[in-house]
Structures are given as C-alpha cells and as structure tokens.
Amino acid sequence: MKAAVKIFALAMALSVGTSNLAWTNEGHEEIALSLSTLLRSARAVISNKQKHINNPDIGDKGLSADVVVGIAKENYEKATGINIDSIDPNSLHGQLVAAELQAVRDVMDDAQSTINEEGVGLKGFLPAIFARLVTENFRDAAGGKATIKLTAPKNYVRNRANRPDKWEHNVIETMFRSPDHETGQHFAEVTDVKGKEAYRLILPEYYKESCLACHGGPKGERDITGGKKEGGTLGELGGAISVVIFE
Ligand code: HEC
C-alpha cells in the first residue's frame, strides 16, 4: 500500500510539477476546489432543509432558486472567506462558477412542484440526488470546459451513474483508503481524459452521524428511501467530489 501511494505521489509530482506548468499556473487547483466548495455549499442548503422539505403539512417551502442560491453563496463565503460575486466573470473561474450557480437554479426551478407538494412526506429530494442533478446540469452549462461528479468507493455506490471511473477508483482505493492518507486531503493530476489532456482533482468525503441512517448498518437493511444500507461507519470514506477541467 505504502509503495503504491509513493508511486502515486511521484506521478503527481511529475505530471503537475514539471511537465505541465501551464496547467498549474492558471490556478486550476483553486478553481477545482472552488467548484467543489460551491457544490457542498449548495448541497448543505438541501441537507439543512431536509425535514422542512419532507414536511407533508406545508405546501410552498420557500426554497426558490433565488433563495437556495442566496444561502449557498453565504455558505461559500463562510467556507472560503470569498464573496463569490467578486470573482472576475470573464475568467475561467468566474465562468465555471456562474455555470454551477445556473445549474443550481435550474435544478431548483425543476424541483418546485416536487418539494411543494402538500400531503406528501418523503419526496426523494435528497442532498446526494440534488448534487447529482446539479452536476448533470453543470455539464451543459459549462459548455464542455469542465465537469463535476459526486462519486463513491465502488462497493458503496448506490446509483450506477455515480460509479467511479478508473482514475477515480484508483485514487480512492490506493490513496484515500490508505491508513497513511491525511483526512480530507485531495489529489490532483494532469492526465488524459477521453483522449484530451485535462486537469483532474478529487476530494474525499466522510460519513457523518447523519449519513448513517441510510449509509450505515446493518448492511443490506432498507433505509427510509427503500435503498439498501451500505454498512458504513462514522468517519469512514463515503464519497468523493471529482472535478475535471479541460482548458
Ligand atoms: C435519507 C437517506 C440518505 C442519507 C441521510 C444520506 N444519503 Fe447518501 N445517498 C442516498 C441515496 C438514495 C443515494 C443515491 C442518489 C442518487 O440516485 O444519485 C445516495 C448517494 C450518495 C452518494 C453518491 C454515490 C452513490 O452512492 O450513488 C454519496 C457520496 C453519498 N450518498 C454520501 C452521503 C453522505 C456523506 C451523507 C451524509 C452527509 C449521506 N449520503 C446521507 C441516501 C442517503
């Protein structure tokens, strides 16, 4: 395991450190982390409002696109110290952040009839589903310049659409699951993606107490959504945000 990690670290040093200065000079790490933080900031809104969303006695939940984007921007500023509106809209960073905010808007516009339905409790508008919809919308909004994906260790994936690709799987298994891995530390590399050179960054996420109602034990038991629990434990690696930037 240790040797594999070392080889990975070496590969990273070679690919990011020397052969491809253009990629690193353009602040791709900053952009990829920023897009990840924005996804988390928006997902946290849906997470914190989950009880409210699933309340059958209320119709209009007051969670319009404007409201969710507003709170997501506040969460982003709390996490980074940066006002997202201050990012130059003409820069690649500004364009991608705008595309992601647009994706959040589109998802919330589409979700209104679902989340505002009176008389229905659980609506299936979960944080992870919201995140997947945002990343799907982002693909178009970003015009092929970047992609974001919420994935997980292969044996923990619920939705096949979220399965890790080879690169993600490799990083998750050889680095993130290694006992030597520093909790929360991301990995980045310039590498080939479908025949194109691209900057890739992947950020680990861990199960919190609130996740275990669905992703915890006993393994195989049904959770409230009807899905099978993974048997995950507190603090265990449960997922990863994976960003690809193509320019
Ligand atoms: C109410 C049940 C529930 C809770 C609570 C929950 N999840 Fe999930 N999670 C799901 C379902 C259902 C999916 C499949 C979503 C989809 O269709 O894309 C999922 C998907 C995911 C995925 C995407 C990969 C995959 O398996 O498809 C990750 C990562 C994830 N959850 C992590 C978490 C974390 C971390 C928490 C706690 C902060 C959490 N979940 C809380 C039910 C839940």
Image (cartoon, helix red, strand yellow):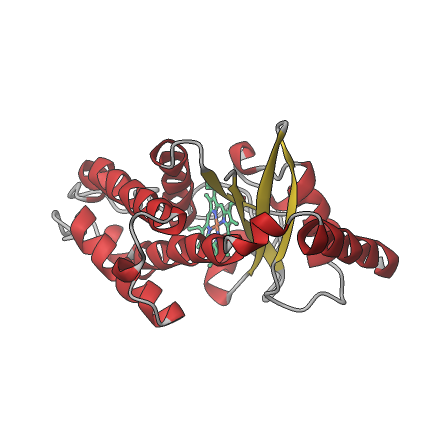
Question: Which residue occupies the foreground of this view, 15 or 171?
Answer: 15
Quadrant hosting residue 225: top left
Residue under the image location 70 percent in, 48 percent down:
19
**Left or right: where 198 falls relative to 37:** right
Q: Residue pushed farthest top? A: 195
Residue under the image location 72 percent in, 45 percent down:
170
Q: Position of residue 140 (x, y in %)?
A: 37, 31
Q: Position of residue 107 (x, y in %)?
A: 28, 39
Q: Position of residue 193 (x, y in %)?
A: 62, 33
Q: Position of residue 134 (x, y in %)?
A: 36, 41
Question: Which residue occupies the foreground of this view, 200 or 36?
Answer: 200
Q: Residue pushed farthest right? A: 3
Residue under the image location 58 percent in, 49 percent down:
22
Question: Which residue occupies the foreground of this view, 229 or 107?
Answer: 107
**Left or right: where 115 falls relative to 205:** left
Q: Is residue 69 visible?
A: yes
- In the rendered picture of this protein, how many numbered marks are placed on residues? 0
Residue under the image location 73 percent in, 57 percent down:
13
Quadrant placement of the N terminus: bottom right
Q: Is residue 217 visible?
A: no
Tell me if residue 178 comes above or below residue 32 in the rendering.
below
